Amino acid sequence: MDIHLIRSKEELEGTCYFEFLPGKYESSRIWSDVSVYLDEESMGLLEPSIEKIKKEYDHFSFIDICKSDWLKILDEFKKIEINIENGNPEYIRRNCAFIFKSTESDFFSQTELNSQKLKILIQDLSDWIKCTLKLDESIAILGI
């Protein structure tokens, strides 16, 4: 599985990506050079953590998330990371979503490797969110 944070628009192939846009969404601000991106399978792994805090989150829409909610989401991400460190793949099975039927079997066919990739994704995205929130009071997620 290819689980990672995409830091450059040049890495994108097509348009099936989730954009994390600093600040509030404005219709003229999409595919920004300052955004980071996730593919659909990677985003699925994190969506339950976002939905737990931001109930109105939707896979297919655009949503602004304020700083205080992002800090709660980061706490949810940290729980996944801790359970990976503790070797608890059942936590991932119960608390991450697998968008496609094959995603779950692919993930658990190489549990240790994919868990480490997920941990790195969480660390990279969390670091980007924390850095971005030093300058902006919100980050928008632009769904597919």
Image: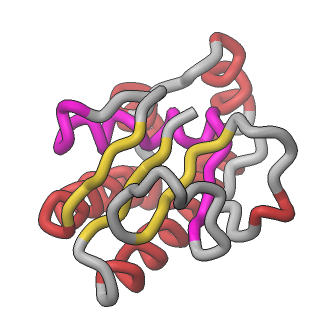
Residue 116 or 8: which is nearer the viewer? Answer: 8
* Residue in view at x 53 percent, y 41 percent: 43
In x, y percent, where is residue 120? 58, 65
| Above/below status of 113 relative to 57 | below
Residue plotted at (84% across, 60% down): 11
Residue 82: quadrant of the picture: bottom left
The N terminus lies in which quarter of the figure? top right
- Residue at image location 30% in from the left, 34% down from the top: 57
**Residue 86 visible in image:** no
Image x and y of residue 29, in percent: 53, 60
Q: Is residue 37 magenta?
A: yes
Q: Is residue 91 above or below residue 140?
A: above
Answer with left or right where residue 110 lies relative to residue 99.
right
Given the current orientation, which residue lies at the most extreme top position? 101
Residue nearer the viewer, 113 or 37:
37
Residue 117 vertical position relative to residue 134 in the rendered view, above or below: above
What is the quadrant of the C terminus in the image? top right
| Residue stretch in magenta | 35-56
The spot of residue 14 in percent (x, y) is 83, 39
User: Which residue is depicted at the point 26% across and 55% down?
Assistant: 65
Residue 45 visible here: yes
User: Would you say the magenta stretch is mainly helix, strand or loop?
Assistant: helix
Image location of residue 24, percent across then percent down? 33, 62
